[in-house]
Amino acid sequence: MDEDINTIVPVEPAPTVSAPRIRENRGDRGKRQGRRPSRRDTRAKPEFDQKIVSLRRVTRVMAGGRRFSFSIALVAGNRKGMVGVGQGKASDTPIAIEKAFRDARKNMITVNVTKEMSIPHEVEAKFGASRVKIMPARGKGILAGSSVRTVLELAGLREVGAKLLSRSKNSANNAYVTIKALKKLETTKIKDR
């Protein structure tokens, strides 16, 4: 029993044995019994469409460092004459979107439209530094840019043109000024042809 302790004997590792893989037939993937239908089918289409006009990350400097929050302006409309603009701010983007949507629904207006889904006459409005002029444009579709176009599309208007008369690039204010201009049409009576 005089074995040398300093001699190193190599030991081979035990062979690894894996369980046999059972492959399912590719054609049977979606046909398994007892499978629930996908969630997308059960969800109803929302009453209002929404589109984000501006998304900003706002920073606040505190004693411990910086705090970030998200400020969102969005336009909501049903494409049948109802449209609104709302703003929301929260530390998380989905919560900010939800707040903005609630605000847009609260401040929704009904646009006075003609049979061709146009406006009866030219209107002009000013909000902050933004100025806009909206006019009927027969047979030309929507002739507008930036957030003004978004508001007109979600309101359901089809044959209108809009011109931003200011140099303002603030898309939230441009959306608000469009709403203000469309609100001026509420008092107009439209003759049936």
Image (spheres, helix red, strand yellow):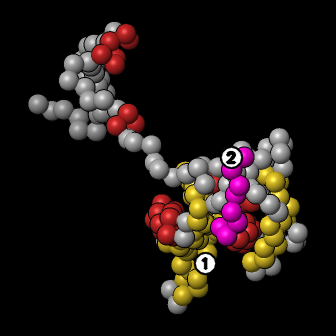
Front-most of 51 and 177? 177
Position of residue 12 relative to residue 42, above or below, is above
Residue 123 badge: none
- Quadrant of the snapshot with the N terminus: top left
Query: Residue 95: x percent and y percent?
Result: 46, 65
Query: Residue 72: x percent and y percent?
Result: 59, 67
Which residue position is annotated with label 2?
Answer: 115
Amino acid identity at mark 1: Thr
Q: Which residues are magenta?
A: 185-193
Mark 2 is surrounded, within 10 Å at the Cα level, by few (under 14), some (14 to 19) or many (20 or more) other residues, namely few
Q: Main secondary structure of the magenta part?
A: loop
Amino acid identity at mark 2: Lys
Which tag, 2 or 1, sits closer to the chain's start?
1
Identify the residue at image location x=34%, y=32%: 38
Q: Secondary structure at mark 2?
A: loop
Find residue 20 and report its image quarter. Answer: top left
Position of residue 40 relative to residue 151, above or below, is above
